[in-house]
Amino acid sequence: MSLFDRIFGGKKQKDAYPKELQTQIEKAMYALQALTAAHDGTWRLGEAAWNVDQDQGTITFVPPNGMRVTAPVQIIGSYDTQDGTWLWSWNNPSIKEPLTADARKVQSLGHEKGYEVLTTPKLTCSEEECWELTALACMLAGAQGAYRGPAGSVRVFMKFGQITLSKAD
């Protein structure tokens, strides 16, 4: 199984979204895959330990190569693997309001275009669809990458901005 299959999942049912939204999501996924490959090749994103500081609005990665990677973070949503549901961050009281701004951009697009999938607070979907929604947020916000962090049975989907590289402590 390739890195992209492990991270982004397999194929899904066609026509899950309106055609115009599907086109945007496909572009967003290609862009996110390219960013992910670059980060994984440069600083081994796929092997890094991670931590989010909601107060500071940052994500820190510590890959096994002795680097520390820090970036501004936005939480897009979370996926509960036990019940197969996605919860947008703007509807999650455990997420600090400033960290939901980019998820709200997706919600605004949904309101503007009438895309219910982007405005429904909690959805039943696949993990691959969570990646697609996160990729869309990345594209709308000009992100430098995205990450899915495990937290028990939940997967937290985040996008990050410009990274800063330094030596790990």
Image: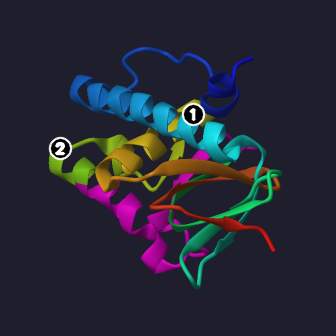
Magenta stretch holds residue 94: yes
The image quarter containing residue 10 is: top right
Residue visible at 76% across and 52% down? Answer: 48
Residue at 60% from the left image edge and 30% from the top image edge: 8
Residue designated by label 1 = 37
The answer to whether residue 125 is seen in the rendering is: no
Which mark lies nearer to you, 2 or 1?
A: 1
**Above-or-below relation of 64 to 169:** above
Measured in 3D between alpha carbons, the distance from the residue under mark 2 to the one under mark 1, in whole angstroms, is: 31 Å
Q: Nearer the viewer, residue 166 or 100?
A: 166
Q: Residue at x 27, y 41 (%)?
A: 115
The magenta span reads: 81-108
Q: Residue furthest bottom?
A: 55
Type of amino acid under label 1: Ala
The amino acid at mark 2 is Lys
Q: Quadrant of the N terminus?
A: top right
Q: x, y (%) of residue 153?
A: 79, 50
Q: Is residue 77 magenta?
A: no
Q: Is residue 47 visible?
A: yes
The numbered mark at residue 113 is 2
Query: Who is closer to the viewer here, 90 or 50?
Result: 50
Is the residue under label 1 in contact with that under label 2 (CB below 8 Å)? no
Q: Does dot 1 land on a helix, a strand or a loop?
A: helix
Q: Secondary structure at mark 2?
A: helix
The percent position of residue 113, horizontal first and vertical second, equals 17, 44
Residue situated furthest left in the rendering: 112
Point out the tag, 2 or 1, that comes first from the N-terminus.
Answer: 1
Count of labels in the image: 2
Query: Is 156 on the left or on the right of 150, as rendered?
Result: left
